[in-house]
Amino acid sequence: MKTNMPNTISGFSKLSKSEKIDWLLNTYFADKENAKALVERYWNSDEKLQKLHDEFIENTITNYYLPLGVAPNFLINETLYAIPMAIEESSVVAAASKAAKFWLERGGFKAEVLSTEKIGQVHFTYDGDSKDLEIYINEVIKQKFFDDSKHITKNMENRGGGILDIVLKDKTADLENYYQLHATFETLDAMGANFINSCLEQFAQTLKREAALYLKGHLNVVMSILSNYVPQCLVRAEVSCKIEDLKSKDIPNPKEFAKQFKQAVTIAEIEPFRAVTHNKGIMNGIDAVVLATGNDFRAVEAGVHAYAARNGSYSSLTHCAVIDGVFKFWIEIPLALGTVGGLTSLHPLVKFAMEMLQKPNAKDLMKIVAVAGLAQNFGALKSLTTTGIQEGHMKMHLMNILNQFEATEAEKVRLVEHFKTHVVTHSSVVEAIEKIRS
Ligand code: MEV
C-alpha cells in the first residue's frame, strides 16, 4: 500500500467521537447528512448507557443492533427455560422454539457437563540439550511456576479453581528447537481468558529468569496465550424417545422419519461438504445464545470446528442412533463459557439474558447452549428430510422481503394472508406487491 494515500489518517483514536464521524463522512460518504442522521439514530439517548457501549471497544461511532429473540419451552434436566437468542437470521428462533415444544412433549432434553479443563501454552525455543531441559523443568523449577503465580491464582484457588498442571512438550520433531509449557486450568464460572493469559505470562517470566541462571543453551519465549481449543471442556446434550412417539402433525410416519433423519446425520458424519452446513445450522443456535449471554462466539466457533475435525476429517457434531425401537439424538461439543466477569457483568442486556436463564453458573450455561445447538439441528434436519427447508424459511423470509419493499402495515396483512396458501419466492412476493399496488 502507498503510505501517502489521501485517505490515511494518523491519530484517529485521539479524535473525539464527533470528530471521528466528521472525518468519516467527509472522506467516504456522498450523502453526509443522511449518513450522519443514521449514525445518530442508532445512538442511545441515555448518555450513561451509550458511554458504557462506547467503552466496550475502541473508536466507537454508534451501535450496531441485532434482534434479541426468545425461544421458550426448553425443558432441560427437568427445568424449564426460555432461551435468549441474539441473531439476525430469520427462522432460527422459530425453529428452536418448535424443536423445544416438540421435545417438551417427549421428556425434554438431558444434558451433562463431561469436563471443564481449559488450556494455555507458553511457546518457546531452546537450542540446548532436550534431556537437560526436561529434567530442569520437571524436577527443578516446576513448583516455581506455581509459587510465582500465587498472586494471580490465590482468589481462584480459594473458590476451588486454579492451575491444574504444567507439562513440558517437546515439539522438536515438528519444528526445530520448539517446545511448549502446556498448562491446564480450572476457571470455574469465568471463561478465564484473562486469568489464563496472566498465569502464562508469569510462567514465561519464571522460565526466562531460571533458564538464564541455570541452563546452558539459549531459551527464547515466542509467545504465551490460552488455546481456544478445549477438547477437555466438554458438554453433552441428548433427546430420545420411542420411535412411535415421534408421531406428530409433521411426522405422520415416524419409522420412515427416524430412518431418514439418521441417514441425514450419517451423511454429515462422513461427508465434509455436508458436515460444514450441518454444523453451521448447529452454530445458528449456539452462537445466538453465546452472544446473548455476553460470551465470546469467535472463541466458541474456533474451538467447536477444531473439535469437529479432531479425527482428521471434518465431521458432524451431532449423532443419531435408532436401536431397539428407540430414537436417540445427541451432541457433544467443547464450550469454554463464563457467567461471571467480562461482558456478563457489564452489558445490561446480558444481565437480562442471565436473569431470564435463572442466573446459570458456567456448567448450566454449557448445557443450555449445547441444547440450543442440538434443537437447532433437530429443527433443520426435520425440515430437510420432510418438507425441505424453503417452505418454512421463505415464510419467515417474507417479512424481510416486504420490509425491503417498504410495505405498509395494511399491505403486510394482505400479503401474509395471501402467502398462507401460496409458495413464497422472492419473485412471487415482488409480483404480489406490484399487483396490489397497481
Ligand atoms: C441455515 O442457516 C442452516 C441450514 O442450512 C442447516 C442445515 O442445512 O442443516 C438449514
Image: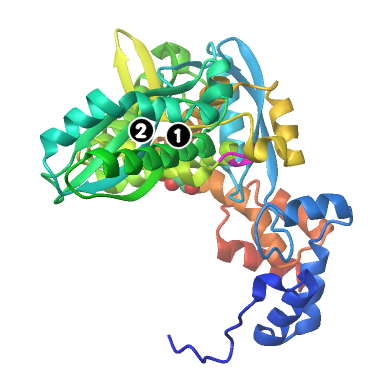
Residue at x-position 66% and y-position 86%:
27
**Residue ID for mark 2:** 317
Q: Residue 180's image quarter?
A: top left
Q: In the image, residue 314 lies at what x, y percent?
A: 27, 42
Question: Looking at the image, is mark 2 or mark 1 nearer the viewer?
Answer: 2
Q: In which quarter of the image is residue 282?
A: top left
Residue 2: x %, y % from top left: 45, 89
Circle 1: residue type: Asn
**Quadrant hosting residue 21:** bottom right
Type of the residue with mark 2: Leu
Label 2 and label 1: CA atoms lie apart by: 10 Å
Residue 371 visible to the viewer: no
Q: Mark 1 points at which residue?
A: 377
| Percent position of residue 152, x then y | 53, 31
Q: Give ligand 1's quarter of the image.
A: top left
User: Where residue 12 sits: x, y (%)?
Assistant: 66, 75
Relative to residue 407, is residue 90 depicted above or below? above
Element on which disc 2 rests: loop
Q: In the rendered image of this protein, does residue 161 appear above or below residue 90?
A: above
Q: Does the residue labelled 1 lie within 8 Å of ligand 1?
A: yes
Residue 263: which numbered mark, if any? none
User: In the picture provided, is 46 more to the left or to the right than 426?
Assistant: right
Please state the extent of the stretch shown in magenta in the rendering.
Answer: 291-295
For the stretch drawn in magenta, the main secondary structure is loop
Residue density around tag 2, few if under 14, some if 14–19, many if 20 or more, within 10 Å: many
Which element is circle 1 on? helix
Nearest the viewer among 159 and 79 is 159
Q: Are marks 2 and 1 in contact (CB under 8 Å)?
A: yes
